[in-house]
Image: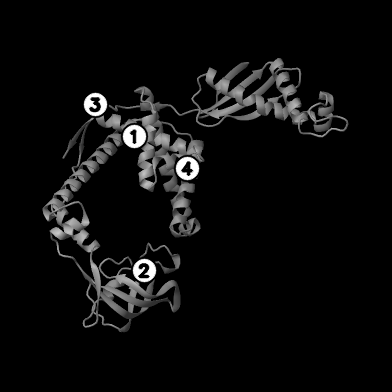
Amino acid sequence: MKVTVEKEKENVVKLDITIPAKDAVDAYNSAVRKISQYVNIDGFRKGKAPRAMVERHVGTERIKQEAIENLLPRAISQAVADNNLDIITQPYVTNYNFNVGEDLTVTAKAELRPEVTLGQYKNLNLEVKDSPVDKDGVQKSLDRLLEQHSTQETVIDRATKETDIAVIDFDGYCNGEKIQGGEAKNYPLDLAHSNFIPGFAEQLVGKNLNDEFEIKVTFPDEYHDEKLKGQNATFKIKINEIKERKLPELNDEFAQKVGPFKTVDELKADIEKYLESERERTNKMNSENEVFKAVIDASKVDIPQSMIDREVNSLRGEYVRRLEAQGIKWDDLVKAQGEDELLKNLNQDALTRIKNSLVIDKIAKEENIKLEQKDLERKFSQLGSAYGITPQDFVKQLGRNPEAIASISQQALNDKVRDFLLENNKIVLK
């Protein structure tokens, strides 16, 4: 087999492949035998018709197509390997010339991995802002624990307070029309932690049981519904029930209830330990990000537009799936933010993701950082924990999605390279 490699625009490479006539004829005859196994030709059992009869019945072009489909993948793979081509897309055939008895000539194209020029990525001296533990962190954590274990008691002899839970009926109107989805019966609204429109919960404070009244609010300018953005609205409210949150007493009995602690002091010590571990985790993450940013900024790579376009399509698909999980349609987002702005952001995200991946692969190659089985197992365990399933079950699910396995393998390699960068650069916490 003869191969000629020609570099075209950007990172596209053209392969002119010549396959000897003997190999092409062998592939053609093999295709004849295969096709004859499942076609019905009068007077012959399946697989027993002579070549001429098969050619007359299905046509030589159909046989050539079968031969090429069996012959070319192996030939192209060999051409790529023999010429040490670092390709990032599956090669595709642009032209071929197949006359039985003559050499088979094929033209294929593929995209090469863009060349990366690394800047300094070792022995850097960087400063990272420390993330100290909040001096009130222990008390805030205790307050949250108490709130999580609080009870609710119905009150009838006073007005609502800002810490109460008000069970309400509400019905919303905007510009004289009912707001779609803007009504409910017996809705328990936590006045202290409301995610309703700003100003809604605040106007329910100081109201009494069975009060009926109206409140006025303004939808935020960034509200997801285009028709309601920045619009004034009126809500009719009725107070059906008022519930007061009762916090448990912070004592040794409470500590024993929430965990393996005998005393409140043990509980506080455990919270302190957790907060310190969170500080260390945050500092490590920030240090990794700072080093990685410095390495990326110092590296140079020319990324072809075709590569960016593919990544934009991939990102858009991921984005659409996340939006759908939140009940938001892509078309609604386009109307709200504008297609040009969305595509601009996706384009920038694609550039960042591609450059990050290329630089990581380059460092891995330069430093001979290789992915081992234990690295994948650790990643499977991490992701399995995040989804609440065992690593074994997680791997079984991945078995049905080769693309997901490739993506996770890349993530595992990313982790190893980031660990390498953290170990080989000096970080000072300030």
Picture quadrant where residue 376 is located: top left
Element type where label 1 sits in the image: helix
Residue 296 x/y as whole percent: 33, 34
Colour logic: one colour
Question: Closer to the observer: label 1 or label 3?
Answer: 1
Tell how many labels.
4
Q: Nearer the viewer, residue 224 or 46?
A: 46
Q: Earlier in the sequence, mark 1 or mark 3?
A: 3
Element type where label 4 sits in the image: helix
Q: Nearer the viewer, residue 54 or 25?
A: 54
* Structural distance between the alpha carbons of marks 1 and 3: 19 Å
Q: Nearer the viewer, residue 211 or 320?
A: 211
The residue beneath circle 3 is 123
Residue 397: mark in rendering: 4
Question: Closer to the observer: label 2 or label 1?
Answer: 1
Q: What's the residue at 37%, 64% (across, down)?
A: 221
The residue beneath circle 2 is 219
Q: Amino acid at mark 3?
A: Asn
Residue 200 x/y as whole percent: 31, 72
